[in-house]
Image (cartoon, coloured by chain):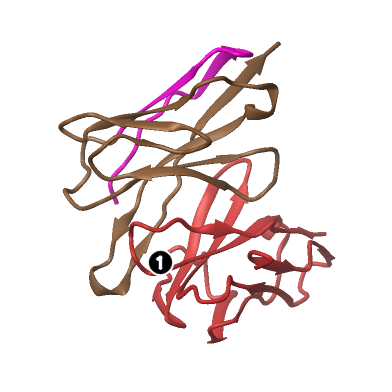
Amino acid sequence: DAKTTQPTSMDCAEGRAANLPCNHSTISGNEYVYWYRQIHSQGPQYIIHGLKNNETNEMASLIITEDRKSSTLILPHATLRDTAVYYCIVRTLLGTSGSRLTFGEGTQLTVNP
Amino acid sequence: DAGVIQSPRHEVTEMGQEVTLRCKPISGHNSLFWYRQTMMRGLELLIYFNNNVPIDDSGMPEDRFSAKMPNASFSTLKIQPSEPRDSAVYFCASSFRAENTEAFFGQGTRLTVV
């Protein structure tokens, strides 16, 4: 599986943008980058995913470099409720059998008042 | 849709007992994942089903663990016999098969083996 590397922890001030980096240098050309987050012991929550182009939804923006070896998740206006562990994942293709999600260690984002 | 439904939410059992965890995926989804989460090892993928067929069970710890998916709307993860080191939160997730669709997670089952 393509391995991802993320910082262990980050801090962000409430109301500011949170930029979470991720390296995935071994990603294959047709593998997607996914971001999930997990608050306390709740089930992981989907945030956003992309292949090549930058993506934006109501939760966040995803910036993928042109060589696809890294990406950045942007939370434009972080709130205290955004405090969570954020996982960057490369969805591994299994031929015609679909694909799987393998989680790494993630980044603990703490949003401070 | 109510999302991925797991039961029970909490389970406390004695060492040596059989434990069965249940999962109802989102209707229409054809891929199902079982994960285990501990402080030490994080979120580990145990097994992955596609169209009710186990595709990858390389994450299943040992023979004490087994998973089935008898139909598209139900899956079980069984531990027999259970051991204290199996204590963890077990998550089930489902998605469409395609690699460009998100997977949705259930709220998990917190298992404690004493």
| Quarter of the image that includes the N terminus of chain B | bottom right
Chain assigned brown: A
- Could you say which quadrant of the image residue B69 lies in? bottom right
- Residue B43 lies, with reference to residue B30, above or below; the image says above
- Relative image position of residue B9 (x, y in whole percent): 79, 62
- Check disc 1 and report its element: helix, strand or loop: loop
- Could you say which quadrant of the image residue A27 lies in? top left
- Residue B33 lies, with reference to residue A53, above or below; the image says below
- Relative image position of residue A26 (x, y in whole percent): 21, 41
- Relative image position of residue B85 (x, y in whole percent): 67, 56
User: Could you tell me how many numbered marks the image carries?
Assistant: 1
Magenta residues?
A1-23
Q: Residue at x 53, y 75 (%)?
A: B63
Q: Residue at x 63, y 41 (%)?
A: B39
Q: Does the rendering let one see residue A34?
A: no
**Could you tell whether A29 is left or right of A41 in the image?**
left
Q: Does the rendering let one see residue B65?
A: yes
Q: Which residue is mark 1?
A: B58
Chain assigned red: B
